[in-house]
Amino acid sequence: MTQPDLILENARIRTMDPAMPWAGSVALHAGRIASVSPDRRHPEPAFAKARRIDLEGRLVLPGFWDSHFHYYQWAMGRQGAGLDQARSFGQCMELLRELAERPGESYWIQGQGFNESDWSENRLPLRWDLDQACPDRPVLIWRCDLHLAVASSKALELAGVDEVVADQHSGLIERDQQGRLTGILREEAVNCVKRAIPEPTFAHTREIMDRAQAGLHALGITGVHDVRLAGNISESALTFRVWQALRQEERLRLRCWTSLPGENRAAAAEIGLRTGLGDAYLRLGHLKYFMDGGMGARTAWMLEPYLDTGNTGLCLIQPEEMLQEVLLAEEAGLAVMVHAIGDRAGHELVGVFEEVQRRRPPSAMPLALEHRIEHVQVLREEDIRRLAALNMPVTAQPPNMILDINMINQCAGDVGRHAYAFRSMLDAGLCLLFSSDCPVCDPNPLVGIQAAVTRARPDGTPEGGWHSEQKISLDQAVAAYTSSPARAYNLAHRHGAIKPGAAADLVILERDIYTCDPADIAATPVVMTVFNGRIVHE
């Protein structure tokens, strides 16, 4: 009889294992689940030497996976101004002033997370606002969706961005009616300024990324898919090197798949990198591409014009070019994930993957992971059905939905009925993976679970839920953070369920979210997180 290291008992365990959906105790040994019992007290007398923890009836779930997470941006952004706390334009400026006055603060002032569509002023900051808040300091702040940023005059000056440079970016660097630069930067135009900011050292980045793991453990997260942003190749390389260093030093305490920018496709293929390379802690995931932008920046590619701008957004890569990229990636053994937020982007992209499947030779070697579409924020019913026929996973962000309600109502109106269509996706048979897109949203999976179940903001509005026909069940929401990612990563035998032989990655909640008021789910504390059989948060 294997002697377990730890027994968690007197619990209410939602195993996500159809063979035993609910259990009362679980024994862990050498990073694996040794046994699961329906009894509250583990019955084996041979387990007398194991450490036993009485959970006093608390809920146990498999460790949460966040399937689309910008780890570098989140970890480094925790050092700057958290503008998601700003409830008005004035508060946003005050947070920047406070940051500029901190002793020892870096020369560049940075912040992320503001959401102007929820402010009473309902307007974007401009460079003159930043100049007034932080005189003589370069400032760069990101909107919550990371598709738009605002730079101060000093930041534009240091980056060498003037009217001539702006003309080279086809309107992504915004001007006012007098032709002056407003400081608003959309999509990859942000990198014109970002490149002027001194890059952190490898040692500093390693320290910050290492320390940030505890923040995820406190939320019950034991696995992430770390996703790169467009036009940040040097940042991507730095992050990848740090992940490898943490793994080599045995300091990596997450299951981490990490993507590469699509711009690296040829280089990755040339040196023989393939999706799936790695071990149980760190693996190479997809190449990341962008079909369009974001609705907050009005750069998501839409079938119908935005109500407030009259345009239909941006196509960042033509479907024909995307098709060639996917075919070349497949040939090299590399899976792709493609950002698609607007309904036109989703429609065109489904067509691309239909053509990829038509052209795939019967003798083609299967990829380690399926291709994926990221966000599917607005997708019409007919395209959801076409996508389901392709047997591809998709990621979606319930916490982003509750940030976007006002914005989508303003810019898209009735088209919002096609947004965040979780029920339609599941009914069609899609493998739906939930995530936070952090730092776009709060990384707490319980925030996402509550949003998917209620389709309401934390304050309960709108009453009954936004487009309530798209609500899903609690178990479906939990699966999208546990068993569904395991299935999508071809790891259902080792992850996503509490069953013998699976990895001992668990989360213990103070409140039973299966019986509490759905409006209380997000406020439920995580009392313990177990990773690979070790308690990493308590």
Image (tube, rainbow, N blue to C red):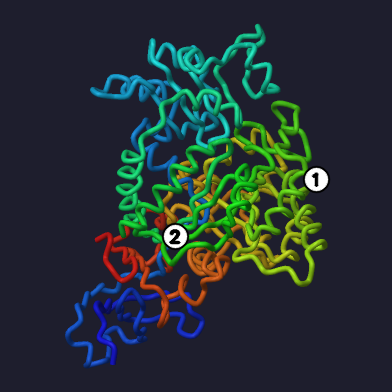
Q: Say which residue appears at 66% left-offset and 9% top-offset.
A: 179
Q: CA distance from mark 2 to mark 1?
A: 33 Å
Q: Which mark is residue 413?
A: none
Quadrant housing the C terminus: bottom left
Q: Horizontal and vertical percent for residue 371?
A: 65, 59
Q: Horizontal and vertical percent for residue 416?
A: 68, 44
Secondary structure beneath label 2: strand
Q: Say which residue appears at 73% left-offset and 60% top-offset.
A: 387
The 10 Å Cα crowd at callout 1, few under 14, some 14 to 19, many 20 or more, is few
**Looking at the image, residue 45 lies above or below residue 521:** below
Q: Horizontal and vertical percent for residue 486?
A: 52, 68
The 10 Å Cα crowd at callout 2, few under 14, some 14 to 19, many 20 or more, is many
What residue occupies the far top of the structure in this picture?
A: 178
Q: Say which residue appears at 63% left-offset and 58% top-offset.
A: 335
Which residue type carries mark 2?
Leu
Secondary structure beneath label 1: helix
Which residue type carries mark 1?
Glu
What residue occupies the far left of the structure in this picture?
A: 49
**Looking at the image, residue 426 lies above or below residue 296:** below
Label 1 sits on residue: 320
**Looking at the image, residue 298 lies above or below residue 97:** below
Quadrant housing the N terminus: bottom left
Q: Horizontal and vertical percent for residue 249?
A: 31, 56
Is 522 left or right of 359, judged from the image as shown?
left
Is 58 left or right of 127, judged from the image as shown?
left
Label 2 sits on residue: 282
